[in-house]
Structure formats: structure tokens, C-alpha cells
Image (cartoon, coloured by chain):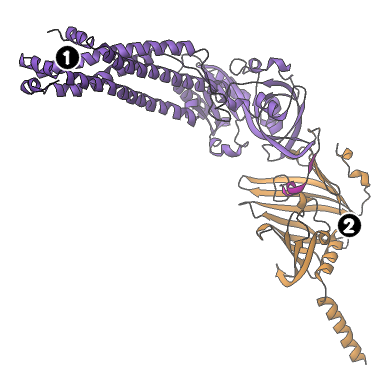
Chain colours: A orange, B purple
Amino acid sequence: MKKILSVIIILFLTGALFGQTAEEIIKRMESNQIKDTAYSEGKIIVKDRFGEKITSFNSWTKGEELSLIEFTSRAERGQKILRTEDVIYVFFPDAEEVMPIGGAALRDSVVGSDLSYEDMTGDKGLLDSYDVALLGSEAIDGHDCFHITMKAKSPTVPYPKQDVWVDKKIYAWRLVRKYSLSDRLIKEIKINTIENIEGSYIPMDMTIQDKLKKNSSTRFIIEKIQFNIKIDESFFSLEELY
Amino acid sequence: MNTYVVAWRNIGRNKRRTALSAVAITVAAFGMVLLFSIIAGLSFEMQDNFVRYITGDILIEHEEFEKYQDINPLHFYVPDQEELIKKMEALEGVAHAFPRINFGGQLYSQASIGEFKRVSIFGFDPVAESDTMNMTSHLVPETNSQMPAANSREVIISEGLAKREGLKVGDKINLATMTVRRAAFQITMKISGIAYFDFSQMNEGIVFIPFDLAQYIVDYSGFDGAMSVNVVKKTNVERGDLEKQINDVLKTESAYQGITARAFENVSTIYSFLKMAEYIYYFMGLLFFLLASTVIINTTMMVIFERTREIGTLSALGMKGKEIVRLFFTEALIIAIIGSLVGVVIGTAMAIWLEPTGFDFKEAMQGVDFQISGMMKPKWNPVIAIFVLAAGIVVSSFAAYFPAKRASRIKPIEAMRKDY
């Protein structure tokens, strides 16, 4: 009897592990990374034919929609990026008007890096924007990963297709490839370091390559991160930018 | 026999034919004087515009700048521009020098989301350039334009930009650009004036900002940078000599390693082409005279045909072949001198009369990046008159040589037998 029960439990567990759908994997990955609130400090290192440029930033996020990034390096002179529900705003202290960014401009480069405004302020709510399918398993840098493909549900989504490799053990993404409508590889994001912060596995160091540019790469490094800090929603407003 | 007297008498025998030949040469000479005067005027205007608005007589910039100028390489700058200007103005042949920062940007407005209008930014020192560009003289009076106040964020925009975007004095504009540290930058500025320039390159899509504001925008302030320093020479100084002198100074200063000076003729490809084209135009002028000379050739052949018996008679009476050639050549020479002289005089008068006003080609020159205005003003000089006169006489008279040579070979017996 004990033997039969053990076999049933093993079969059940085995079935549970290999029976995960792509949606379940994405949900679990996002729950790992999307927190009620977060504060981080980091830097963006851009390498191109003109040399290396380092930009430092502080970032605040609340939920899936709200984020504020303040660039603290000398060159940026107080530039800020605010993301609200549907619009991203870019603030410069010397400008009286705050510039909204939408549509194709979301794919414009941030501070000359391989990151776009859309990349920088988050790829939140993947299941709202994409239909996902599990293609199988693949090892990335020695880590066994789920290989998931995502197709955009609407033409307004910046990247029509993405492929994601999610670490099977920790449910954090290891590699992302973003494609155009014609299946041309536009961007590749590779995770260099993942750390366990307050029980969540967070990519702390990643390399982004814009495949449409030659000899260009960006390294995005988070140096400090805190979750569930107190941030009022009014913090993410145009008035707070000044 | 006095060839000149006989020739003079002969050309009076058929006044209409003589007049036809002379008029053809007159028209060609007149056209050439006017054409060369217009080219001289274009060349002078281009040079003047270069010195005033673009390069000065000598342009000092980083040696790598020109190679990458299509991407506006801010990092190839001239450091310590104020010190460099002092050194330049201490040189014997320099009248004055001034800094410039020119870069690209985009105007934007929250009212027109996503609409970015490309503009050129022209950072200049209004005081240092009061003798060259003299911005005050370009302000459009009807618009209540003023020069930007010191230490302000006031700017002047070109009339073309004002019309295109519906802007006026007192409006605010938002400018987006990149800095030397490869950072995005945006700033709001107020329009204090609208400026008009005769040539389209300076009149389309330009925002003129004070030099210190330009330094702040592109983040050159920390090292007192400029994109270039323009040098204006004194009147009797050779540009080439001054270029060499400035380069010798730059080579000795460690702060200016990689910074070079070039005379404006070595900067502008278009100006070099224009100077080369002058030689082509001189050649075309000679061709025009040849074409005009076909009239003389034709009339000379007709005269020879009609006077065959006369030639035969002269030949029978002992006139040698070369004397016959000389006779017809002299007739052609007299017509050429008269025609060329009249043509040059009329052409000169026309060129001098048109010099203040010129021809208006502004509509045709819209959007043409040619460093000239649309007004084509002739600039006459005596060299043009002398060249056209000489070319007209030489080409036209020698054109008659071949039919005259043919006439000298007519045998008297055959000439007598012909019925004309």
C-alpha cells in the first residue's frame, strides 16, 4: 500500500513539474520580480565606437505601471523619466515643458544606450500583451531553462515577438531575445548575475545588445535594491518632477 | 598698296553683310562680358559669405572634425577658445577672431506630441562678430526684434524658421539636442528676434544663440570649448601666408595638439568647384566666339565667291597669294575689332548698371545649399573687358584666315572664265 502511495505521489509530482504551461511559468517569473514597491540604485555602462560612458541612476517603482528614474550622473544634469499608466514622460530641469513619449518613440534609446524607454521602465504584464507558448528546455550558461516564445496580441506592443529563457530552478529569466515583425532579431538581453534579495531572485547585472547597431553594447547593473518601501502614488506625478 | 585702306573700303562695299558679321561678334562679346561679370560676382559673394558667416578667412578646428562632420562630432572641439583668440589677435595679419559652436537639434512642443522639427543651432558671439556677421543689421525691423539680453536664454531665429513654424518674437521654443558627454538635453528659450539673410543656407531652420548659452547647452563650459575659431585677416594679407603662420603657432602649443587652421578655399568644396568652373567658362567663352565667327567665315566665303573675278584680276596684275590673304584677313580683323569693341562697351555698361541690383533668382535657389544668395549681381573688372576684347578679335579674325587662304589659291585663268 505504502509502495503504491509513493508511486502515486511521485507520478503526481512528476506530472506537476512537466505539466506547467507557459502562462504558469511567466506568472511565476513575474511574481518573483514584480513587487508592490521597489527602490534601486545602479548604473548603465554604454560601450560603442566612441568609447565608454557610465550613467548612474536611482529608480522607484510601484506595481506594474508606475516608475520614476532619476539620473544622478553629472552628464545627465538631473534628467528624469516618469512612467504612468500609458505614457512615459522625460523631464529636464532646463526645459519648461515635460516631453511625453509614446508609440514608436518608446523604442528610442535611453541615454544613448541599447536600452529603450520601454525596456527601461519595464516589460510589465507580459500575459496582457503576449500570447505565450512553451517550446521546450535549453541550457543557458549551464542553467537549465524553459524556452518560451511570446507573440504580441496587438500591433501597439513595441516588440511583436520575444523569446524568453526562464531558469527552471529559480524562475528568473536568463536570456531574452526581441524580434521585429519580420522575425529579425532586434535586441538580446543576457543576465550575468542573479541574486536572492529578500527571498526573490532578481537579475542584478545584465548585458543588452541592440542588434541593429554595430559595436555597441550596454551593461545594466543594479547596485542596491529594496522592496516594499513606503511610496505614495502621488510621488509618480508630473508635479513631483520639479 | 595700303592693305588697310583697301580693306576698309571693301568692307564698306556691302554694308549689310558687314553689319551682320559685326553684330554677331558684338552679341557674343556682350554676352561674354556679362557672363564673366556675373561669375565674378558669384565668386565674390561666395567668398564674402564664407568669411562673414561660415569660416572666416581662416577656420581653426580639430583635425578630425571634417571627417565626421556629418554626425556633428561635439567631442572634436577646440579647447580654451578665449586664450586661443588672444593669441590669434596678437598676430600681425589678424584683424579679429571669434568662436563658434554649431550643432543640430530638434524643436518640440507638448502641443504637438511626437512632432520634432529639425533645426540647426548657431552659437555665436554677437559682440566679437559685430564687424563681420553684424547680426543687428539682419534683424527684421517690423517684428520688434532685439538682440538677446546678456546672461539670458533669449535667442534669435531665422525668418524662414519663423514663417515655417508660425513663431514670433516673445514666443518660447523647446530645444532637444545631445551634449558632448553624449547625454540628451532639453532647454526652453525665448525668441528675442527674427533675422533675415540673403542666402537660403542662413535663412532656413536656424536658431542663433549667444555663445555662452551654446557652451552651456553642449556642456563645453568646463573647458571653455568651441567647435571652431574663425579668424578674419587684415586687408593686405595673403590668406595662405596667414594659414601657415597660424598653424606654426598651433604646433608649438601643447594645449592645441590636433587643432589645425585652413584657409576657407581649402574648406569649401563648392568654392573650389566654382574657381575651377571659371576656367571652364573661359573656355566656353572662346567657343561662343568661334560660333559667332561662323558668321564671319560665311560672309568671307560669300565675298570671295562674289569677288572671284576681282581676285583673279588682282592676281593677274601681280598681287601675290599672301597679299590676298592679308587683304581678306584685314577686312575680317577690322570687323572683329569694331564688333568686339562695341560688344565689350555695351556689356561693361550693362554689368556696371546691374551691379547694385542684379538678377533675382531667389525662388529658384530655395533650398539650394550653395553659400550664395538668390541675387546674382555682376562684378565687372577691367581684366574681363580686356580678355573678351582680345578673345573676340583673335578668334573672329583668325576664323576668316582659312577662306582667305583658299582665295589666294584661285588661278587667274580659272577666275576669269567663271560667270558670276
Chain letter belonging to callout 2: A
Q: Quadrant of residue B53?
A: top right
On the same chain: label 1 and label 2? no
Residue B328, above or below A79 = above
Q: Quadrant of residue B389?
A: top left
Instruction: Single out the mark in the foreground, 1 or 2.
Output: 1
Q: Position of residue A120 (x, y in %)?
A: 77, 51
Q: Which residue is mark 2?
A: A35
Amino acid beneath label 1: Leu
Which numbered tag is attached to residue A38?
A: none
Q: Work out whether residue A38 or residue B388 is closer to the camera in this orientation and state it.
A: B388
Residue A228, above or below A12 = above
Residue located at (85% from left, 66% from top) = A28
In the image, which residues are magenta? A99-113
Q: Which quarter of the image is occupied by the C terminus of chain A?
A: top right
Residue B80 seen? no
Q: Position of residue A150 (x, y in %)?
A: 76, 64
Which structural element holds mark 2? loop
Q: Which quarter of the image is occupied by the N terminus of chain A?
A: bottom right
Q: Which residue is mark 1?
A: B327
Residue A204, above or below B416 = below
Q: Position of residue B113 (x, y in %)?
A: 77, 40
Q: Residue furthest front?
A: B419
